[in-house]
């Protein structure tokens, strides 16, 4: 256990011994970078990034910025959640949701009597039954992807570009 703690502390503190885990990890990362399509941005022998990499991030930022301003509005974010949920509902479940809306319940309260609570319970039970575990998992996965996209959109590209500025 103390060996693991020492490795973590040395990794965080930056103590670099030849053959240490950090050096091995860095060599693996350099090898992976040199074998992919972004190898043109990284010069392995000099250990430097090409200024074109900053331009790449700036162009990415210019492309994503309108989406960033769009997602800052909480109403639009709520609408995205609603659209995501509706994408995984069938027509019958959508009808149940409409019947359980506050406006529809207020109208039904006027025309209906004491059996309204029983009808609402039946509608709610039918709505709950329309969600199976597979549908819930698929909707969660889709929403998680949207959340990942949102984190990517709100990444601080400007700060990253400033690191390239001499």
Image (spheres, rainbow, N blue to C red):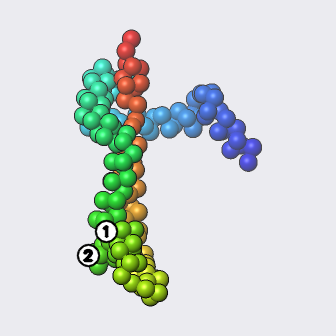
Instruction: Please indicate whether residue 145 sits to the left or right of residue 40 in the image.
Output: right
Res 90 → quadrant: bottom left
When the figure is inspected, residue 117 is found, relative to residue 22, above or below; the finding is: below
10 Å crowding of disc 2: few (<14), some (14-19), many (20+) = few
Res 155 → quadrant: top left
Which residue is at a point 27% across and 35% down the rendered structure image? 66
Which residue is at a point 36% across and 48% down the rendered structure image? 75
When the figure is inspected, residue 73 is found, relative to residue 83, above or below; the finding is: above
Which residue is at a point 43% across and 37% down the rendered structure image? 29
Which residue is nearer to you in this view: 99 or 81? 99
Which residue is nearer to you in this view: 22 or 38? 38
| The C terminus, quarter of image | top left
- Identify the mark at residue 88; answer none if there is no mark: 1
**Residue lying furthest top in this view?**
166
Pointer 2: what residue? 91
10 Å crowding of disc 1: few (<14), some (14-19), many (20+) = some
Q: What secondary structure is marked by label 1?
A: loop
Res 127 → quadrant: bottom left
Position in image of residue 74 (x %, y %)? 39, 45
């Amino acid at each position: 256990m103390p060996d693991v703690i020492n490795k973590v502390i040395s990794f965080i503190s930056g103590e670099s011994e030849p053959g240490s885990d950090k050096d091995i990890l860095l060599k693996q990362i350099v090898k992976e970078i040199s074998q992919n399509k972004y190898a043109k941005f990284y010069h392995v022998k000099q250990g430097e990034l090409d200024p074109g990499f900053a331009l790449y991030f700036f162009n990415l930022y210019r492309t994503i910025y309108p989406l960033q301003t769009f997602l800052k509005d909480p109403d639009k974010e709520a609408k995205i959640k609603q659209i995501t949920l509706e994408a995984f509902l069938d027509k019958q479940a959508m009808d149940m949701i409409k019947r359980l809306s506050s406006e529809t319940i207020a109208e039904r309260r006027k025309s209906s009597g004491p059996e309204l609570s029983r009808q609402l319970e039946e509608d709610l039970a039918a709505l709950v039954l329309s969600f199976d575990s597979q549908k819930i998992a698929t909707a969660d996965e889709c929403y998680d992807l949207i959340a990942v996209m949102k984190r990517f959109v709100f990444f601080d590209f400007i700060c990253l570009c400033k690191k390239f500025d001499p």
